[in-house]
Image: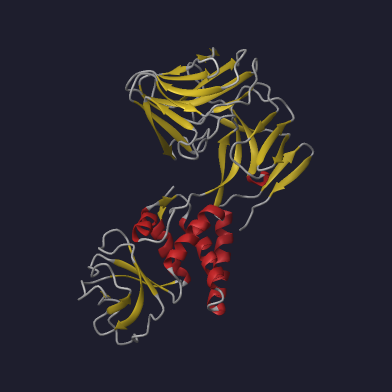
Amino acid sequence: MASSTGQQIREELQRYGLIRLLGQATATAGGTNRLRDATRLASAGLPSSAFDDCYVRASGTAGNVDGEVVKVDYLDQDLGDLYVSPVWSAAPDSSVTYEIWRAGIHPDEVDRFRDEALTSICSQWQLLPVSHVNNAAYYVDTTDWTASSSTLARQGGTFPTEVWPASLLVTNSGANGRAASASIYALQPTDRFYLYVPVSTRVGTAQVIVRDVTNSANISLSGTATATRRGWTGIEVTGQVPSGCDEIQVWLVGQGASDVVEWGPVFFHTTNARKVQLQRPESRKFVGSIYRLHYFPTEGGGGKWGEEDLNEVPGVRRRQVNDTVVLYFDEPMWNTPYLYEERVYYAALSTAYLTAANRTTGDTATTLCPLNYVAAATAKLVAERYMTHDPEFYGWVLQKAEERLARREQEHGADPKPIQERDRVVGIPHIRV
């Protein structure tokens, strides 16, 4: 899937009339109080007041004032010099690209709306593991995973992306380097558990360990707990919580001092469980279908990625418990991976918006959200914000943005989910912001 940068998203707003002009300086002007564009701004047909009350933003990464925002003073239409106040930090050179915004719109606000569109409007259904392990799919980078004699790095969008959104690369700096999960307290002594982890061993030997933290010992596992080849396979094991154990962890280990292992999501649940609390979603309306994974690869067994199958699990109730969601299964869970669909939003491209460095960071950051989807959502938010400035113009922008957003929602967004819960169908609606 093609990615889009923050700058590309913002420049797309020219289609809605929110940007008056996209241009590039043609030469270095005589001072820091102007920008020269003899190609687009030198015209007798343009009055000196053509861009009154407009902000100018230097964009891109090649110019000497990238990320700076100034306001138009007046236009010298004979030379194509756009005078500004406050002044630039340097006289803009011919590598500077710029945006002149519609009067009154501040581009910093547009960046905020862009990120609001990504984090609260644009969404998709994502398959995530039903698991007792926190951040089992590494969706929040490496949060809840602790490195030991290793470094951890989230790998995004790698094969097979239809089964998991990310993987975890563990690069050892010593023997038995590992990524250790956050501690799990949900199981009781004598409880049996099921564990499945996709794995690609780039260098060395991969191993899965379930650690009895209480007694500082490894729990005995049934099944093949190691893998040695780079092609994606999976480690599938079962075990039992020993007597006197109150705390366990899942360890993803590379046995050798220089091993490099890539891990998929961790599927971990109690054998015959009929209730699992999901780790991520805060609302049952964000939880879609529940699936069992079949014909998946295992080390020493059969199956290949590309041959796996997902079967929807009937009779699963989604219960809202405070700010968490609990799944209740009519039938006990099998010893197989379970996944659920979660309506997820995209990540923001910026965390701050006030300095040139903040702006260029957002300009170069990328998102997999389709460009026309996030642009329509951003235009909608901008139009709502500035409606009182010019109701006729921004009313038109809002109408066009909502029309395009509705179309893009159908093409790219999270479809409404009819969910079978026992004998009744529950609609999981598409939530608009």
Q: Is residue 310 above or below residue 342?
A: above
Q: Quadrant of residue 280?
A: top right
* Nearer the observer, 205 or 134: 134
Give coordinates of residue 410: x percent, y percent. Answer: 59, 55
Q: Quadrant of residue 127?
A: top right
Would you say 6 lies left or right of 135 here? left
Residue pictured at 53% horizontal, 61% vertical? 377
Q: Is residue 213 above or below residue 368?
A: above
Residue 3 makes an appearance in the image: no
Give coordinates of residue 73: x percent, y percent. Answer: 34, 80
Would you say 155 lies left or right of 340 here? left
Q: Quadrant of the C terminus?
A: bottom right
Give coordinates of residue 408: x percent, y percent. Answer: 55, 58
> Which colouring convention does the figure follow?
secondary structure
Residue pictured at 42% horizontal, 37% vertical? 154
* Nearer the observer, 295 or 18: 18
Of all residues shown, which one is farthest toward the right? 423
Q: Quadrant of residue 242?
A: top right
Give coordinates of residue 214: x percent, y percent. Answer: 55, 18
Please count the marks in the image. Answer: 0
* Nearer the observer, 123 or 36: 36
Q: Is residue 211 above or below residue 58?
A: above
Residue 354 makes an appearance in the image: yes
Q: Is residue 280 above or below residue 398?
A: above
